[in-house]
Image: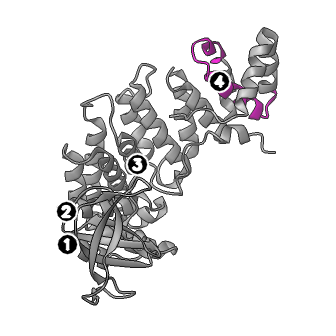
Amino acid sequence: MNRLAPLLLCVLIDAAAACPFCGPVAEPLATRRARSATVAVGETLGPPAAAADGRRRQQFQILSVFPATGSGLEPVAPDRLPVRATVTADFSGTALLFETIADSWQARTADELLIGYCLTAPPPTDRPTATAVRLAWFARWLEHPSAAIAADAYAEFAVAPFAAVRDAAKAFEADRLAGWLADPAIDQQRRGFYGLAAGLVARQQTGPAAARCRQAVTAAVSAPAVSDFRAGYDGLLAGLLVARGEQAVPVIEALGLLAPNASPVDQRHLLQALRFCWEEPADTLPQPAVVALTQRLLASPNLAREAVIDLARYQAWDACSEVVSLWPTGDDDPLIRPAIAGYLQACPTAEARQALTQLRTTDAAAVEAAIKAARLPLPAAG
């Protein structure tokens, strides 16, 4: 069995699966359409009512249905019977209706603009090249005046693999990204994604567009925090690392993010960005630089445990002595010792074996308890 298995239970992200900075999003409409047996446009016939299963359902008259192919709605017979659909909010008027299984409908409010968008949106695909092409189509709809369309276009990027987002970066306009990064009214989670997108433009392009995005993401990262919680800051940091590579490290140092007394929230954002860099070193930092920065976070009391876990994941065994030095802090943080024990058990060096022996000499019961705990999934780190 892989000796790292207990620690790998704590791995927080799989950067290849989807955007690690975008947060939870609703299922994109194109995906919902693709998995539905029928998609229709309807009108409400009355207010919703609670059903026996606790859900709220509303009656709709279907007016037209989406075609199997093409972008023109198909009318239905005027005597078609109404359907009852699950709704999440009361509304009246036009709706998009999705029949995911026979006679099981869900509805959401819609207008002509959203219906047209849903009709023409390219369907999901498993082909990487085609995925990047379809993302370029959705890029034009980001921050659209229609809140529903803007949210759906963002969701497409949020669920896409980073490689596809990277390959679609040519569709991003530098001036639009810079404007969104400077606009405090933009949703903060989306702003984090725009930081990543600006980093990609800065890395891939040259001239004024690259300089504009590089300056914009650096300014966004360096702007004073308006509160202790900064949603999307991890994305901004990742964008900085994509845009500047190793030249981003002095910026991070100047912001004080590596200091032991730095904001724990900001440091967790940094740790998340470093995890992304480990997965995407060709676009960010070389992996040895990721290890070096993570190792510096061992000195931060609120991040030490997570840093130990990440260093074990990176097989950074040169940090053994620093990791062992954290053992006394277990009196204040009961979760740090299982991370240390897991690291030492996974580490193949004689130094790690000697450290475990020495710790057992001091407090054998505490070491065995930590080793036992290291075999279990720990509470979420970060």
Earlier in the chain: of badge 1 and badge 2, it is 1
Q: Is residue 240 above or below residue 306?
A: below
Q: Name the residue rendered at 82%, 11% in the picture.
A: 361
Q: Residues within 10 Å of mark 3 (few under 14, many from 20)?
A: some
Side of 259 where 293 appears, left or right: right
Earlier in the chain: of badge 2 and badge 4, it is 2
Instruction: Look at mark 3 in the image and give the residue it sits on.
Output: 23
Residue 342 in the magenta stretch? The answer is yes
Instruction: Look at mark 2 in the image and give the residue it sits on.
Output: 146
Q: Name the residue rendered at 33%, 88% in the picture.
A: 70
Q: Secondary structure at mark 2?
A: loop
Earlier in the chain: of badge 3 and badge 1, it is 3
Q: Amino acid at mark 1?
A: Leu
Percent of width and height locating residue 63 = 25, 81
Instruction: Look at mark 1 in the image and give the residue it sits on.
Output: 113
Res 233 quadrant in image: top left
Q: Name the residue rendered at 24%, 31% in the picture.
A: 226
Earlier in the chain: of badge 1 and badge 4, it is 1
Judge by depth and name the residue closer to the eye, 375 or 281.
375
